[in-house]
Amino acid sequence: MRWHTGNPDTDPWEWRMRVLDERNDIAYAKLFFKKSGYITKEWYPYFLAARRRGRIFDEEYADGKISAYAKRIYETLAQARVMPLHALKRDGGFTKEEASKFDHALTELQMRMFITMCGRQQKISQKGAEYGWSSTVFCFTEDFFGQEIFKKAARITVPEATEKIKSRILELNPAAEDKKITKFIMG
């Protein structure tokens, strides 16, 4: 393995995003234990049912379950529906002093399944030249897999969703601890 070479065949850093370019049945985001991971279209409705419980962003924010920083990111993304990380920071008015708040809020939105990574985009200078590393692009989860996933999630109760996920976890890892299973499912 050769890290940070940009070669899609040998660079693991490239592999993480490559799946988004080559497949339409897998999402990649910070979903599990606040770390990045993959989730298939098959399992997405179960996690949506468990984590979002059919609620929309405004309801969660009104109930104090979403931070003001996450709201800033969400509202900024709503302007374009698809945005690279650097544009979200810039257009959301995030300062260097707010970098950790921005990162935390971005993770919060991914863990709550309101946004997801949907690709990458090269940064462009004012002169129109590409520069630096590519920037991760984010979109709303509704736009990534489409409304059918959300309709399916709406038909799944929270207990059904958690039981199905838990059964699969225990099938793959019979020694998994209940506390970790719950954290994995609920975020």
Image (cartoon, rainbow, N blue to C red):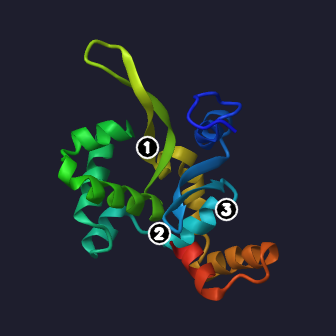
Give the position of the N terminus as an image quadrant: top right
Image mark for residue 43: 3
In depth, the one of 123 and 42 nearer the eye is 123
Q: Determine whether, in the image, residue 24 is placed left or right of residue 116.
A: right
The CA distance from mark 2 to mark 3 is 14 Å
Which residue type carries mark 1?
Phe
**In the picture shown, does residue 2 fall above or below 98?**
above
Q: Give residue 59's quadrant in the image.
A: bottom left
The residue under label 3 is which amino acid type?
Trp
Return the residue nearer the eye: 92 or 9: 9
143 to the left or right of 181? left
Seen in the picture, residue 20 relative to 102 is either above or below; the reply is above
Label 1, label 3: how far apart the Cα atoms are: 20 Å
Could you tell me which secondary element the residue under label 3 belongs to? loop
Between 70 and 47, the one nearer to me in the picture: 70
Q: Secondary structure at mark 2?
A: loop
- Among the two numbered marks 2 and 3 on one chain, the one whose residue lies closer to the N terminus: 3
Give the vertical position of 6 relative to 1 (above or below).
Answer: above
Image point (81%, 76%), residue name = 171
Residue bearing mark 2: 52
Where residue 118 appears, as percent x and y from the top left, is: 51, 41
Write down the quadrant of residue 77 in the picture: top left
Q: Are marks 1 and 3 in contact (CB under 8 Å)?
A: no
Amino acid type at circle 2 is Arg
Could you classify mark 2 by the number of other residues whose Cα lies within 10 Å: few (under 14), some (14-19), or many (20 or more)? many
Residue beneath disc 1: 138
